[in-house]
Image (cartoon, grey):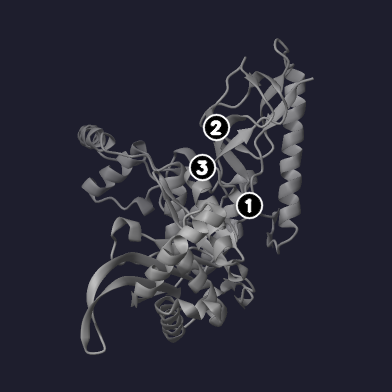
Amino acid sequence: MATEIIMPKAGMDMEEGTVIKWLKTVGDSVEVGEPILEILTDKVNMEVEAEVAGTIISVTAQEGDVLPVFTVIGYIGNAGEEVSTTAETIKEEKATDIVKDTVIEEESKVDVPVNQTGKFRATPAARKLARDRGIFIGDIPGNGPLGRVQLADVEEFNVIKATPLAKKISQVENIDLSQVKGTGIAGKITKDDIKVPIDKVSLVEEKIQEQSKVIKENIIPMVGLRKIIAERMKDSLNKSAPVTLNIEVDMTNASQLREKLKDIVLKEIDKKLSLTDLIIMATSKALMKYPIVNATLVEEGILINDNVNMGIAVGLDNGLLVPVIRGTDKMTLKEIVTSRSDIVKRTLNNKVKPDELNGSSFTISNLGMFDTLSFTSIINQPNSAILSVGTTSKRMRVIGDEPQVRSVMFMSLTLDHRVMDGLVGAQFLQYLKDVLEDPTLLLL
């Protein structure tokens, strides 16, 4: 009997996935655990593995398709076996029922507003933006799964919708589109809705076609991970009140400690000790001393996290991911080295799990390996702060009354001023500097 291949629910927040690439085609044999296709979740590319051994006998989803979780996208069975249309229909109906049940169950956990037409669905970000703009959420058409109102729906609400040609004509002829009734799809204004001579419309059309041809040659599509990153960075700036503090750290002693320990660590756990590991350990200690920097802003107020779940920014060819090392405040240096090495390696190889990209309480972004002196990072929501680490380089500094060559590093802390004041951020940075300049404080 054929076994269905389904769009997996990889993470609590995942509602749909995109089929990126089939690694196996109809007729190919597969083993249990063998990757058969690659999908894009809302956070990361991941491979879907075969749950049974057999032959790919049917593929019902094409590359580029965006489908709800639990949707059947193919079948594995015996060579030559066929899947009846009836069987596929039953599977699809079951998948739809599962999706509906999941949505109902998730929505029952939150306070769902109602209007005269009954309940409506909306994401938390969409609700907040609607409140900020004084818009009743029930008036906004939802374009998300099952009609859910998303952030983009709120942003576009009450925005005049018109085709590019109609907008261009209105600019040339100085026409107020707010006074024009659109007859296009969803009330969109088209060129036919604007009363201007045909020859002028043709002239504008020619200019648009020329401009479009030039633009398309240089366009990189904003899709996949790049699009997700763009949305989240903008969302972070909209949600927070960022303030950045900068500090200079003498890393001479920390660098010497790394030199003394790196061979010992390599021999014991077969992993390389990096300065990042020492920074993670020192930062975790500083966060426990100043827990407000490790906090999360929630609807009820400021949530003080009991543990340090450290996000580590990892750059990929097509974007940025932040895998999380949980409980770094309770880890030994060897445990930090092992965890950091493992999760960074898997992230670079697209093997990180979606749930490993959630739950951070603080984030470190290190561009020191690219000789970047200093930079400012955007806060990784829902964190309240992020540490940016620059390169460590030899510089002349005055120690006592004598000039000395020291290993110097620049760090910056970007914090959410809604959660904490700059004074606390400065105290946190000063303590972190003290620990890194005298690593024996890590033993206390």
Residue that label 3 marks: 350
Instruction: Judge left or right: residue 313 versus residue 110.
Output: left
Q: Residue at x 20, y 36 (%)?
A: 207
Q: Secondary structure at mark 3?
A: loop
The spot of residue 81 in percent (x, y) is: 73, 12
Instruction: Judge left or right: residue 390 versus residue 101.
Output: left
User: Could you tell which of marks 1 and 2 lies nearer the N-terminus?
Assistant: 1
Does residue 301 appear in this view? yes
Q: Nearer the viewer, mark 3 or mark 1?
A: 3
Q: CA distance from mark 3 to mark 1?
A: 19 Å
Q: Which mark is residue 65?
A: 2
The spot of residue 89 in percent (x, y) is: 74, 25
Q: CA distance from mark 1 to mark 2?
A: 19 Å
Asked whether the residues under the numbered discs 3 and 1 touch, taking CB atoms below 8 Å apart as contact, a structural biologist would say no
Q: As shown in the figure, which amino acid type bears the numbered disc 3?
A: Asn
Q: CA distance from mark 3 to mark 2?
A: 20 Å
